[in-house]
Image (tube, grey):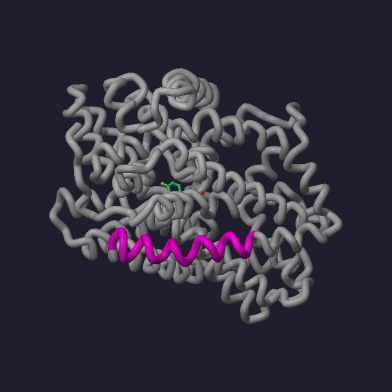
Amino acid sequence: MAEQSSIHGLWRSRWLFILAAAGSAVGLGNIWKFPYITGENGGGAFVLVYLLCIALIGVPVMIAEVLLGRTGRQSPINTMTAIAKDQQVNPAWAGIGWMGALSGFLILSFYSVIAGWALNYVCTTAMGVLDGVSAAQSGETFSALLASPLTLLFWHSAFMLLTLAIVSRGVNKGLESAIKLLMPMLFALLALLLAYAFTLEGFWQGFDFLFSFDLNKLSSDGVIVALGHAFFTLSLGLGAIMAYGAYMPANVSIGKTVLLVGLLDTLVALVAGLIIFAIVFSNGLEPSAGPGLLFQTLPVAFGQMPFGTLVGSLFFILVAFAAWSSSISLAEPVVAWAVESLGMSRMRAAIVVGLVAWVLGLGTILSFNLWSDVTLFGKTIFATLDFLTANILLPLGGLLIAVFVGWRMKASDVQTEADMGSGVLYALWRVTLRYIAPLGIAFVLYNGLK
Ligand code: PFF
């Protein structure tokens, strides 16, 4: 395809792309979701499968997704439309973009509610409400939050506004400035908390829980959750990374860059796991507590340590920051599309996208209280949205991306755009993308849904 240019701007450097993509990838998925699904799925064996999914499926698909974005240089919907036309394949391939837009709305709707929990905890921790709490008291505080639709609504609205404030400012003034500030702080705080966790008596028990593999503990459900999480945590399969790829400068090696993003994301998840399970085991808590794990366990530790109020508030600020740099990437693909195709201003597009996701979020809010017994396939609304997006739509999006880049695009075009030369690395990527990733995803999806 002839060289395209992005009307939305470009990241100013390779590092800014890395920070932005890492900002999208590192989020609630790493700090909140990874520890609790690991706890629910029995620990080490689940972690092993998750790591395999990242390496054999996630990273190859991520390279393909960035490549598509950089080739098309538009929102995912228009990028896929343009590339399908250029490659003279069925225009229905643009469906990858449309399906991604749907997933983006659904995820943003519940993501904002959970990020709202973090905002709420910034306040409760800073005001000293959680000073010296026992595990039981901390559990009660969390249940009280979930039981209050209005409190949840308030924080959900606040978080959605924060997201819109950045997205409406655009790539350089909005996304880039926010990310430059947020990411280094996030890394610093995680390092500090890891050092603290290391001093706890339960550290090695947590370590064992994460890294000792007992395959008997793994269910087939666990495998689909691990694959789904690999997509969720790397922000793959819905076009977020494609949109960010569209703003990537031309002279940057996609392969190496993506590898770094994948490593950073995995590192943050493992460190978050080490911190949280150290606290869980040091305080005799349950690793399988579910979605409340992060919010019930950490306050217990903060309540006991010196300067706990300060460290605790900072920690929840960072959870919120991590979520913020991810939520902007959920909104960006659709906002960019509305700017390109509906001729909206960025501001207006951001407001419309935010409003739709905000309304959808009400379903998640109510699923924790008034509608807690409304279920679909035995799951609450929140659990359904989470399952449908992470475990079905994202892997399906990833499967289509792998097949499109691996089998439908001309190999010579792919090789030129990938810019990885023709050596071992490129060959390895081609093979994983064409065979291992699609077969792996199809196998897990088929077995998981059967
Ligand atoms: N990767 C983010 C996280 O781990 O929290 C969540 C996410 C962001 C998923 C953007 C999908 C996406 F497009």
Tell me: 238 left or right of 425.
left
Q: Is residue 162 above or below residue 241?
A: below
Question: Please, what is the dominant secondary structure of the magenta stretch?
Answer: helix
Q: Residue 371 or 137: which is nearer the viewer?
A: 137
Q: Is residue 207 above or below residue 352?
A: above
User: At 60% from the left edge and 71% from the top edge, which residue is drawn?
Assistant: 314
In the rendering, at what x and y percent does residue 79 appear?
24, 39
Tell me: 102 left or right of 28.
left
Quarter of the view holding residue 422: top left
Residue at the far left: name it. Answer: 343
Q: Quadrant of the N terminus?
A: top left
- Tell me if residue 363 can be seen: no
Tell me: 302 left or right of 336.
right
What range is drawn magenta here? Answer: 170-190
Residue 176 drawn in magenta: yes
Q: Residue 359 or 69: which is nearer the viewer?
A: 69
User: At 45% from the left edge and 71% from the top edge, which residue is drawn?
Assistant: 154
In the rendering, at what x and y percent does residue 109 appear?
41, 54
In the rendering, at what x and y percent does residue 145 appear?
58, 67
Q: How many numbered marks, from 0 up?
A: 0
- Tell me if residue 100 can be seen: yes
Q: Is residue 345 above or below residue 270?
A: below
Residue 187 drawn in magenta: yes
Tell me: 245 left or right of 200.
left
Quarter of the view holding residue 49: top right
Q: Residue 160 or 238: which is nearer the viewer?
A: 238
Q: Residue 256 or 137: which is nearer the viewer?
A: 256
User: At 43% from the left edge and 61% from the top edge, which residue is drawn?
Assistant: 179
